[in-house]
């Protein structure tokens, strides 16, 4: 009986963390799906969110929800800024430039954090969230539950936004057919910027959520960033439901394997799974039928060449 | 409605359109026909602003639009139904229509336009909640035209609407275009298929190698034996 | 203007200067006593090797390997474990380690190079992290996170020296060998292959190259040198741990040094290392000690700035000024090539006249895309020197057929028979070797090379020898009439030139049949006429031609036989005069006979 309880407890924990992972992956998928750029600094954006949460709640004593709200706006601006300054100039450049631009950003963010906060593991203090409550045999961590609810809430808002507002639909449209969107009067570059803004916003929000559960340190983005990549690859970068389910599955894997395997081997398992999925089915296990872009097709060009 | 004067267009260093002039009056259907590679799509690209012209004037409703960005032209009523349809396959039909209504000037009319479009295309109404990618070729073409109409167009440009469609479906599409014309929308039809386009148009222009070779009433052009020469280069 | 990376010369000026610099360093070294400066020099040499090795894969042939340092680590651990746990002498162990790493790189490459750029980059990071964690985990072998210590007093026979100098000499030797190898790529088939697959993967396939194999080989050679560097590092420090040899920071650094200096050049990575390492070490000792992370943050900024504004590095900036000074578009060596080009009446490989030879046969090929049949049961056969046209209205299936015949998409059923072999699924490189060549409608020149170099890539399809390839290329360029533009970079060529270049590249592969994909599009009528003359000239060399075209004059001018496609089926076959009278053909082009009241 005991082992059953533990098992289910692990599943509950896995689901709870999975919700946050879903929000985190969503930010990555949005950017990749719309702008078709891989953001190698994704984990670092998350890290910034976690540090912001720490600074706001623990250093400045601001209510975490207020901080989150302001943080969302800041991250939106952050995303748009990165898109304009770093991404836009290299949309047509060889992939080499695109990769290193975001790698460079990742290093700047990570090391600035290192410079400011040192390598210490910092914990966010939120008094009233530090307890847990019981339902039946099972223990629920308040922090995890709140984080889960927040994340799922944000996801629902986003899905609603994407389906029911003009800008949201424009984003989906650009992701499916750039030229088609352009012809219908959608400004592609503005849409790219908004996609980045929203993507960063999701990631920052996920950072706030995660900070209530995990300690924050400069390299925290490495592992979580990788998890986001795995989930996006697993779920298919154009399939939101796939990503959500993928996130819950990874949450489970994390929860269960953390119990069974040692911490270090767990990470090896992740990386191996990642590699294997990449090699077997690069478009994701649940991914749609969207064609993968060829290696040398310029992204910025909006005129089909040689129609004469 | 649309007036194009002395248009010259190039792709980089290669000039492909030479001194082309044509006009489309209100409530007309004008066809531009020509063999493949004649420059039909290039003209569309230049008129919609996607490809900048070297020289020439393009006037929409009397207003010079050459300096306007493509998205602005769409908002002004210059709407294109692209070759290959370019729908959004993972969205529902209704959502596709809503994208058609994206230009700010069209958003106010979205409900009325949708009713109008449902009336014209019962098939689209029937399948409004289906995913656009699951529609047949003919249905997709109908949807594409409907999307164009959602933008409250002053001038609707149709780029090769008959391509890849079976003759029966093409007939149905043409029927609908007739009805659209009856509601007072001006149309520019660009087609490779001479019978399809000249059959329904009021006037036509025949283009070859980037130059206008013939123009006149559609019926007269259709019966002109020279057209065969143009297509088969005799 | 971009730096042209391949120069045809025994020892180019840059190469001479490099060897001089290395020689000078080697001579001056014994007089340097300061340990701190010696340490800097060692690091410069080590990173020069690593950055150069990385440059071989990413700079020269394309795939962005972010986690490349994994091979450095595998090499370091291999030789060290062999030494510490199995007593293998490092002088031997360094090569065994290199062998292990090379095989490892080959195996990884076979799987990972199938991935598209971004995913490939991600996968190399994943690989690096896996090795990092494993190295930390298997403590009995590797010493885990505490690291592996090598005996400091072992002595020269075990590659452990008291002074830093011998290490630097070994490093210089490795660097010298690596740079010599890189320079030799200028005149080798492999070197040209690297640039071809980098510049235009699709076009390279049509030139007989198989991109994955090219990359795997480059990865293996690169890993070999990374491994040597790793083992040398282990011997120098007498200590390695997962963080120091499987560290992502180091991976980014070597990429950064190569980028700053200039990827795709031999000297670039060296310049990057020579400039950046002393700067970093000095910076670190002045400020960095108090602020951890500052130097990497600055590196991040450098990376962004260079990638945005100077992605070809300092070398390309220097070359721009150098060329402005010299006021020449290109090097003197190519000018010499122009003078030396032989004058030939025709191609040096004209095929024997033999009317009965069928050079290409297409048997009942069909292509289904899901529920749509794009091409249905299409057949034809082609004899030596025959010129046939393939026409049809838009959407008739011409492009699909073309891509099937040239191996770019697989047929759903049916056979392609080329050079006597039957193919159910033929890849472009296989067909190229079988004598089937093609041009691309959207021209695909190899961008950073000259006209001559472009055609040489084609010539390498049928030979391994540089001299032979070059002679073939020269003959072909003369044949198509572009002898005066031998040394032009592709950016300087007109549209008509580029179309002729497509033909030249195809001709250089010594084909028996060339398929032309709308070669006239974008040409003026005069240029079209010239092209027709050239096409006739080619067919007189007994090379068969399949011409897919819209421009009817060309078809009537050049083709003996015309095939008409509509809705994926062959609807007419005959001479041009016959098919234009054909009712079905007219209907297909003008449309069905609908009449509206």
Image: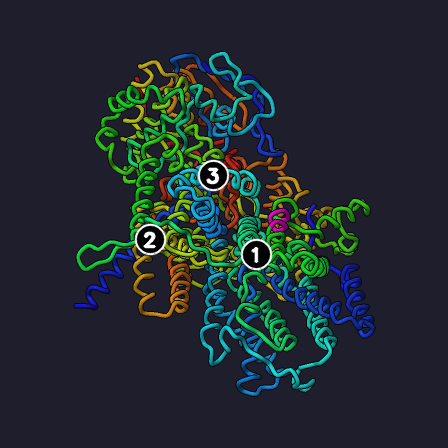
User: In the displayed structure, does residue C228 sit left or right of residue B64?
Assistant: right
Q: Nearer the viewer, mark 2 or mark 1?
A: 2
Q: Nearer the viewer, residue C303 or C337?
A: C303
Instruction: Decide which of tag 3 and tag 2 comes sooner along the chain.
Output: 3
Task: Give the labeled residue for mark 3.
Answer: A74
For residue C248, which quarter of the picture? bottom right
Secondary element type, mark 3:
helix
Measure the alpha-carbon separation of dots 1 and 3. Answer: 37 Å
Image: C453 above or below A268:
above
Residues tagged by mark 1 and mark 3 found on one chain of the structure: no
Residue C391 visible (yes or no)? no
> Which residue was labeled with disc 1?
C62
Q: Is residue A168 above or below residue A132?
A: above
Chain containing the residue with disc 2: A
Packing grade of label 3 (10 A; few <14, some 14-19, many >=20) is: some
On screen, residue C267 versus residue A194, left or right, reads right
- Disc 2 and disc 1 on one polypeptide chain: no
The front one of B186 and B66 is B66
- Residue carrying label 2: A130
CA gap between label 2 and label 1 equals: 51 Å
Q: Which residues are magenta?
A: C301-306
Residue at screen point 47% across, 39% down: A74
Q: Nearer the viewer, mark 3 or mark 2?
A: 2
Q: Secondary structure at mark 1?
A: loop
Q: Verify whether residue C461 appears in magenta.
A: no
Q: Separation of disc 3 and disc 2 at Cα?
A: 27 Å
**Numbered disc 2: secondary structure:** loop
Q: Considering depth in this image, is C215 or C316 the residue closer to the camera?
A: C316
């Amino acid at each position: 009986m005991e082992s059953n309880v533990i098992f289910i407890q692990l599943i509950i924990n896995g689901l709870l963390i999975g919700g946050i992972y879903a929000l985190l992956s969503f930010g990555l998928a949005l950017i990749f799906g719309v702008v078709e750029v891989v953001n190698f600094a994704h984990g670092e954006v998350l890290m910034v969110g976690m540090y912001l949460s720490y600074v706001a709640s623990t250093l400045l004593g601001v209510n975490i929800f207020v901080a989150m709200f302001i943080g969302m706006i800041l991250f939106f601006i952050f995303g748009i800024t990165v898109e304009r300054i770093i991404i836009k100039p290299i949309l047509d450049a060889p992939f080499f430039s695109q990769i290193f631009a975001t790698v460079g950003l990742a290093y700047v963010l990570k090391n600035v954090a290192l410079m400011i906060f040192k390598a210490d593991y910092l914990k966010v203090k939120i008094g009233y969230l530090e307890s847990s409550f019981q339902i039946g045999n099972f223990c629920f961590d308040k922090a995890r539950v709140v984080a889960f609810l927040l994340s799922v809430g944000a996801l629902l808002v986003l899905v609603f936004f994407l389906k029911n507002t003009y800008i949201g639909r424009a984003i989906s449209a650009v992701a499916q057919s750039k030229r088609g969107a352009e012809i219908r009067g959608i400004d592609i570059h503005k849409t790219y910027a908004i996609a980045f803004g929203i993507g960063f916003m999701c990631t920052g929000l996920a950072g706030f959520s995660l900070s209530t559960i995990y300690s924050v340190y400069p390299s925290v983005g490495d592992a979580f960033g990788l998890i986001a990549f795995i989930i996006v690859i697993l779920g298919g970068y154009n399939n939101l439901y796939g990503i959500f389910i993928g996130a819950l599955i990874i949450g489970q894997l994390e929860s269960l394997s953390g119990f069974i395997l040692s911490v270090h081997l767990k990470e090896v398992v992740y990386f191996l799974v990642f590699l294997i999925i990449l090699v077997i089915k690069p478009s994701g296990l649940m991914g749609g039928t969207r064609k993968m872009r060829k290696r040398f097709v310029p992204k910025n060009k909006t005129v089909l060449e040689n129609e004469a | 409605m649309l007036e194009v004067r002395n248009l010259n267009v190039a792709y980089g260093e290669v000039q492909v359109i030479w001194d082309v002039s044509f006009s489309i009056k209100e409530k007309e259907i004008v066809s531009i026909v020509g063999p493949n590679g004649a420059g039909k799509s290039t003209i569309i690209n230049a008129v919609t602003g996607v490809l900048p012209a070297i020289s020439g004037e393009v006037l929409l409703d009397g207003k010079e639009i050459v300096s306007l960005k493509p998205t602005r032209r769409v908002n002004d009523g210059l709407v294109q139904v692209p070759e290959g349809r370019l729908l959004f396959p993972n969205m529902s039909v209704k959502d596709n229509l809503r994208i058609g209504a994206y230009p700010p000037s069209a958003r106010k009319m979205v409900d009325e336009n949708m009713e109008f479009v449902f009336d014209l295309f019962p098939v689209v109404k029937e399948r409004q909640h289906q995913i656009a990618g699951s529609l047949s070729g003919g249905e997709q073409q109908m949807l594409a035209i409907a999307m164009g109409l959602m933008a409250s167009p002053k001038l609707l440009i149709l780029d090769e609407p008959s391509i890849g469609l079976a003759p029966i479906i093409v007939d149905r599409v043409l029927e609908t275009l007739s009805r659209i014309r009856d509601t007072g929308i001006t149309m520019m039809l660009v087609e490779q298929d001479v019978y399809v386009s000249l059959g329904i148009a009021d006037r036509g222009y025949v283009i070859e190698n980037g130059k206008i070779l013939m123009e006149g009433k559609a019926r007269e052009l259709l019966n002109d034996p020279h057209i065969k020469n143009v297509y088969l280069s005799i | 203007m971009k730096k042209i990376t391949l120069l045809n010369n025994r020892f180019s000026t840059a190469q001479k200067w490099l060897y001089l610099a290395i020689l000078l360093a080697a001579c001056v070294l014994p007089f340097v006593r300061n340990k701190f400066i010696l340490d800097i020099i060692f690091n410069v040499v080590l990173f020069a090797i690593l950055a150069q090795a990385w440059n071989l894969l990413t700079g020269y042939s394309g795939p962005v390997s972010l986690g490349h340092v994994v091979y450095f680590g595998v090499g370091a651990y291999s030789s060290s474990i062999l030494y510490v746990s199995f007593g293998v002498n490092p002088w031997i162990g360094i090569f065994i380690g290199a062998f292990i790493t090379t095989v490892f790189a080959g195996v990884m490459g076979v799987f990972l190079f199938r991935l598209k750029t971004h995913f490939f980059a991600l996968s190399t990071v994943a690989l690096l992290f896996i090795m990092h964690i494993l190295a930390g985990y298997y403590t009995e072998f590797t010493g885990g996170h505490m690291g592996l210590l090598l005996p400091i007093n072992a002595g020269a026979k075990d590659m452990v020296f008291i002074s830093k100098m011998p290490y630097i000499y070994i490093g210089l030797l490795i660097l010298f060998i690596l740079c010599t190898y890189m320079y030799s790529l200028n005149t080798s088939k492999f070197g040209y292959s690297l640039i071809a697959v980098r510049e235009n993967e699709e076009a390279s396939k049509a030139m007989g190259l198989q991109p994955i194999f090219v990359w795997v080989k480059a990865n293996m050679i690169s890993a070999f040198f990374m491994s040597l560097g790793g083992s040398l590092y282990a011997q120098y420090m007498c200590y390695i741990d997962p963080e120091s040899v499987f560290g992502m920071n180091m991976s980014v650094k070597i990429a950064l040094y190569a980028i700053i200096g200039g990827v795709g050049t031999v000297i670039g990575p060296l310049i990057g290392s020579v400039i950046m390492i002393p700067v970093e070490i000095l910076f670190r000792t002045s400020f960095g000690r108090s602020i951890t992370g500052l130097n990497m943050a600055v590196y991040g900024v450098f990376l962004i700035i260079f990638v945005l504004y100077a992605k070809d590095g300092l070398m390309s900036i220097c070359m721009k000024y150098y060329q402005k000074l010299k006021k020449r578009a290109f090097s003197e060596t190519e000018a010499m090539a122009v003078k030396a080009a032989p004058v030939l009446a025709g191609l040096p490989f004209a095929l024997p006249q033999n009317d009965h030879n069928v050079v290409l046969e297409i048997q009942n090929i069909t292509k289904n895309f899901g529920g749509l049949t794009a091409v249905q049961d299409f057949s034809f056969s082609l004899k030596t020197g025959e010129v046939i046209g393939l026409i049809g209205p838009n959407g008739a299936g011409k492009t699909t057929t073309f891509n099937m015949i040239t191996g770019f998409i697989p047929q759903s059923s049916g056979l392609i028979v080329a050079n006597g072999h039957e193919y159910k699924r033929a890849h472009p490189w296989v067909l190229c070797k079988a004598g089937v060549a093609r041009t691309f409608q959207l021209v695909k020149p190899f961008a950073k090379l000259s006209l001559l170099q472009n055609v040489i890539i084609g010539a390498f399809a049928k030979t391994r020898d540089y001299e032979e390839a070059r002679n073939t290329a020269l003959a072909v360029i003369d044949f198509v009439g572009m002898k005066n533009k031998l040394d032009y970079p592709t950016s300087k060529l007109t549209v008509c030139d580029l179309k002729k270049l497509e033909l030249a590249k195809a001709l250089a592969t010594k084909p028996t049949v060339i398929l032309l994909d709308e070669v006239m599009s974008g040409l003026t009528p005069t240029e079209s006429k010239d092209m027709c003359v050239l096409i006739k000239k080619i067919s007189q060399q007994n090379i068969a031609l399949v011409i897919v075209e819209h421009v009817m004059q060309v078809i009537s001018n050049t083709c003996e036989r015309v095939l008409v496609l509509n809705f994926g089926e062959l609807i007419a076959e005959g001479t041009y005069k016959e098919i234009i009278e054909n009712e079905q053909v007219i209907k297909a082009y003008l449309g069905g006979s609908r009449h509206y009241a």
